[in-house]
Image (cartoon, rainbow, N blue to C red):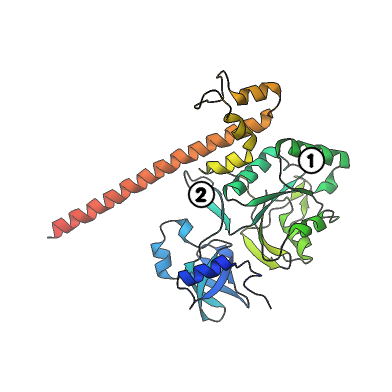
Amino acid sequence: MMTLYDLGFTKALAKHQKELGLESFGIGRVISEHKDRYIVKTTTNELEAELIGNLRFTAESRYDLPAVGDWVAINEYDENKALIHSVYPRTSVLERKAVGKLGKTQIIATNIDVGLIVISVNRDFSVNRIERYLTICNSASIKPIVVISKIDLIQTSELNTLLDQIKERIKGVPIIAISNQSEQGIDEIKSVLTKGKTYCLLGSSGVGKSTLINNLLGDRVMNTGEISDSIDRGKHVTTHRELIVSENGILIDNPGMREVGITDNSEGLEITFDEITNLSLNCKFNDCSHTNEKGCAILEALENGELDNDSYANFQKMERERMFFDSSLEERKKKDKDLGKLIKNVVKQRKKDKY
């Protein structure tokens, strides 16, 4: 029989349950989200759930509402139906900049232990893209593993060249090369998965995330698309995040992400580009802009070939995105604050007019 710990429950969550006075409620984990409705998995069932009014109306932001991976306090009220009363504290929040929305973030999933960054060897391959995924994992304190997929499409010599490109710029991150067709490398991934741990698959559309899940589970639980001859990659299939519990751990599939926007968390960039961060400590001036100053350790490393130019250019691009996000976030907060003042003043004036 499945236990809560098979679903990823921890002793820390059990402590929160007691501290928050939630012992009288059932416990479930959100496995999928559809606008304002959720599918919540318990040890015995999967329930269609919705929020109680108080939780919905007291939520100050999207962060206060459930997301895939969340633990929630529930109350079953009908066959296969439940109400969500509370969201448990999260151990991690994997997020990115919301597409087309200034200063806003989008939660990808919560309570993740490991991010499996899936990059295919064909059109999707980009070390810059890998560094972006590493940054959002590092921002959430999630351990990353890079999975290079579709290696059956290239020769061994080509694969080795790609692996060397990655290793030149990315240090200390496990890299596993796989083929979903021949299942080469699948056992290696299985060997690093642990029951009760949660793994989130990250990557562009068509890189083989859903097929990888099917291969890891030994069953066709995820829909997959055929390979398109015109664009040389799988067709986009996953339309929403979905959590699957198995003996090999808990797997979360994600829709393919065309954009991996950077938020205001600078720690993720510092960890991903730790070589640049460490070099900056040796600059002559504390406020060094690393553009033309004498005694700049980063510029010296670039000139000496000790620092990769492409990696530094990618760091600069993401740092500019982070700074822009930070400024747009502050602007949005100011607008929200001004709107709040306006509403209060209107309400105050109406009360005066009334009396």
Q: Position of residue 94 (x, y in %)?
A: 58, 53
Tell me the element at label 2: strand
Residue 197, label in figure: none
Q: Decide: is 203 above or below 313.
A: below
Q: Quadrant of residue 214?
A: bottom right
Expressed as whole percent of the image width and height from the top left, the position of residue 208 reads 74, 53
- Residue furthest toward the right? 156
Looking at the image, residue 290 sits to the left or right of residue 305; the answer is: left
State the SS at label 1: helix
**Which amino acid lies under the numbered mark 1 shown in the image of this protein?**
Leu
Q: Amino acid at mark 2?
A: Thr
Instruction: Find disc 1 in the rendering and name its residue.
Output: 163
Residue displayed at 84% across by 46% down: 153
Q: Residues within 10 Å of mark 1 (few under 14, many from 20)?
A: some
Residue name at image x 53 percent, y 52 percent: 106
- Which residue is under mark 2? 105
Q: CA distance from mark 1 to mark 2?
A: 32 Å
Nearest the camera: 275 or 291? Answer: 275
Of tags 1 and 2, the one toward the viewer is: 1
In what quadrant of the picture does the N terminus appear?
A: bottom right
Residue 93 vs 219, above or below: the answer is above
Q: From the viewer's perspective, is residue 323 above or below residue 309?
A: below
